[in-house]
Image: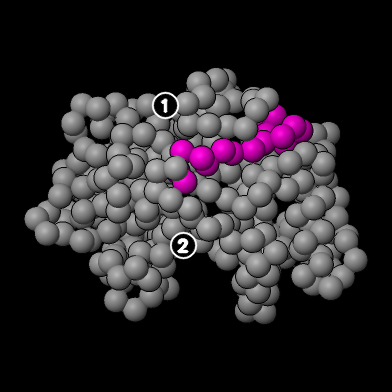
Amino acid sequence: MSAGSDLHVVLGARGAVGSAVVKELAARGHRVRAVNRTGGLSVPDGVEVLSSDVTAPDGAAAACAGAAVVYHCAAPAYNRWVSEFPALTEAIRKGAAAAGAKLVLADNLYMYGPVTTPMTEDMPYAARNPNSRVRAEMARSLLAAHEAGELRVALGRASDYYGPGGVNTTVGATVFAAALQGKVARWVGSLDQPHTLNYLPDFAKGLVILGEDARADGRAWHIPAAEPLTGREFLHLVFAELGRPDKSASVSRTMQRALGLVNPIVRALGETWYQRDRPFVSDATAFTDTFGPLPATPHAKAIAATLAWFRTTLED
């Protein structure tokens, strides 16, 4: 870490998670560099914007230069995880290590595979599908780099997310934009299984806590979320906020298979259908026991903020 540096660098700052982390860091008074491939970001006052291709080692090194903490929020398209994610993460790891920076990965829950109980961080990485194996391999390699003393690492894990800016998610436009436009809001999977959903600003707060606190180093953490809801309960809150009768449906496994014939991203969702046909619940006890409560935004309030953001995008 550069001597006396308080520079926090966010890679993938145009994405939903990265953008939320930039805002949280700025609100906490940190020096922030927001990095994406093309620049042109809308960021809070005082935030440095850098255009850099972090898939290339030189680009990652330039992006991370002078950082105290680097937040890896960059990701290739879902259907390119297997071919592109490992090399991207290796370039970022090397760039952060060269800067002497701590690396915080915005991670998910894929590596655990099918589960029958709430997920905890000590569960084995039992997933067998390609995208989930990539996530598991990335986690193992980063934690091995930490153990080897190459750099400090912390992993922050969330379930499916929603919130302002959340478009590349199963709980995005097909729910919020559709409801605002009077269309059917579609939930991917069973409407009646409990599912943890992380609100983007809360996920960002959790990641920043991991970046700020040395107790986070060397392991994975589940970021707290509001209580699990079924798809039916979540969609009801959406329509209640709009003051309209529910107009919703599920995307069944049969429908997913049909849509997947022409859409590779939808096709890839079939690999993790076990997240959608049974309870999929994250246990964040370790986080709250270590860092104290992270008050999760109630779903009703979070849904109202998300609808407001989608409304502005539809009006543009």
Tell me where residue 272 appears, x and y as whole percent.
65, 31
> Label 1 to label 2, Cα distance in Å?
26 Å
Residue at disc 1, secondary structure: helix
Q: Which residues are magenta?
A: 271-288
Give the side of residue 106 with respect to residue 251, left or right: left
User: Mark 1 or mark 2, which has the lower sequence index?
Assistant: 2
Tell me where residue 30 appears, x and y as whole percent.
28, 66
Residue 21 picture quarter: bottom left
Colouring chosen for the image of the structure: one colour
Q: Residue 137's mark?
A: 1
Amino acid, disc 1: Glu
Q: Is residue 183 visible?
A: yes
Residue density around tag 1, few if under 14, some if 14–19, many if 20 or more, within 10 Å: some
The one of 42 and 238 positioned closer to us in this rendering: 238
* Residue that lies at the very extreme toward the left in this rendered image: 3
* Location of the C terminus (image quadrant): bottom right
In the rendered structure, does residue 274 fall within the stretch colored magenta? yes
Residue ID for mark 2: 20
In the rendered structure, does residue 117 fall within the stretch colored magenta? no
Q: Closer to us: mark 1 or mark 2?
A: 2
Q: Residue 214's mark?
A: none
Tell me where residue 256 appears, x and y as whole percent.
77, 38
Residue density around tag 2, few if under 14, some if 14–19, many if 20 or more, within 10 Å: many
Reply above or below: 208 against 192: below
Residue found 81% across the figure and 65% down from its top: 239
